[in-house]
Image (cartoon, rainbow, N blue to C red):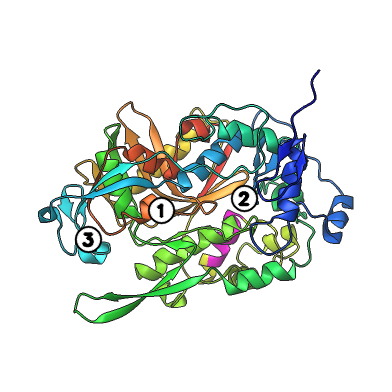
Amino acid sequence: MAAAKPLECPFCNFSHPDDYALHYHVETSHPEEDGPSPFAVTEDARQEVTEDVEEEAEGPKDSAQDYIECQCGEFCLLAELESHLEMHYAEGTSFDETKQTSTDLAVPGSILLDGRATSPAMQSPPSSPVRDVVPASSKSMVVRSKPRSQTRNRSGKSQNVVQDFIDVLRHSSTPPPRTVSKQRTSKVPQRLGRAELGPHAHEERMPDWLRKQLEQGARVTTATRIGRDGRLIQIEKIANECRDIIPVLAQLCDQDPTVSRVYLCHPAVTHVAKIHREGGFCGYRNIQMLVSYIRDARSEGYRHFSGRLPSVIRLQDMIENAWDMGFNAIGRIETGGIRGTRKYIGTPEAQALLQSLDIGCRAEAFNEGKDMPVQHQLLQAVEQYFLDGHPNMNGKVCQTSQPPMYFQHPGHSLTIVGLEVRKNGSRVLLVFDPMFKASDGIRRLLGVQFRASAPDKLLKAYRRGEEMLRKYSTFEILK
């Protein structure tokens, strides 16, 4: 058998016949940003390996034995890695061409929703005229180790980048089980393990570099613009936050011929994404999204949140304070405390925080064992939630004033901002996923009217359909 052809590092003269060895070299010798490489073994990591390994019950769903680390720093099930990477591609969606058309269609101070112009109070005014959008193919994630065999199209890009990247990651060691959804059926509170709290379940303190990063937050920039009154105003932009996405989703769903009806929550919800290499703080990021609605819609409890969104460190203090007040206080026993750690949190912690501030909310769990499949139970409940908020809706796009919902499935949490009913009868959740940032393509459409030739490409990052949901046997929502 002929020897494998050495793979070359794109940054130096290093070469090696094994793709994982090359991947290791790139991560340790050419990191993307300052900070410890995920491949570098530290004393903390060695100590964690020697800790007791939590046993995980086997079952037909929610298997916790095949988790793998993506290059983005997050752990996900190996069976879901392909869809996870597809979300990264959707995250990089851009446009080859944006053509400006008739300015007569632009309506100052409003965006068309459900065939009617919404009031300026419900959304941000458009800053430019109607655009005719022609989406390009999605950008690919950078896979810096070269696969042994791949075909290339005329542009020189791999036609099977997803599988190439999966093949590389299969060489990685399997991380500890990750199941965030807490099963609280025991009468006696017990300390949870890695299966519920993640690989840092026994951590007493997160690394100093990470705490500093979370305290500083994402990069903040300011821009000067002309306000409605003609005066110059300073607009602050935070790198991991994106406002005014819901009016864009409304237009995209309206233009998608496969959608029969779409329900959307109040548009005052900011999409908050994780920052580079922060790890599993998705629960906190979803709480920030709920807070963004409370703050910007001036909903119940908004006086608790002025200025910027509370940081992850601040939210940990608020949850600990909620436990001190007796709200879901069992959480402190089960987690051993979360202040200053990387332990995963879930629906009970989000509920405790809101209730401690006298903000009304209600948690609901969906499990197998009923006549209806668990994913259908969830989708039916979400649709009813939007119908309850606006029972007399007509037209294709149903813009409601309902708050967003905290959504938990084993291993991850998201924020539900809407629901699609397709012409084939299926239903699809519309979510803000903190694991992924808003694409450049979406950002270019903020505050304007437009026509998209392929709206499904831009909607892909926000859709979670039945095919994805049927992988799980339990869900939780907080509304």
For this orientation, the residue located farthest to the left is 104
Q: Quadrant of the C terminus?
A: bottom left
For this orientation, the residue located farthest to the top is 1
Q: Secondary structure at mark 3?
A: loop
Q: Main secondary structure of the magenta part?
A: helix
Residue at 67% of width from left, 32% of height from top?
Answer: 167
Residue 14 is inside the magenta segment: no
Q: Nearer the viewer, residue 263 or 163?
A: 163
Name the residue that disc number 3 marks.
128
For this orientation, the residue located farthest to the front is 13
Q: Whole-Å distance between the Cαs marked 3 and 1?
A: 17 Å
Name the residue that disc number 2 marks.
72
Q: Place residue 149 in its image quadrant.
A: top right
Q: Quadrant of the N terminus?
A: top right
Expressed as whole percent of the image width and height from the top left, the position of residue 94 reads 39, 47
Magenta range is 346-353
Q: In the rendered view, would you say 251 is above or below 213? A: above
Residue 421 visible from this viewpoint = yes
Q: In the rendered view, would you say 326 is above or below 449? A: below
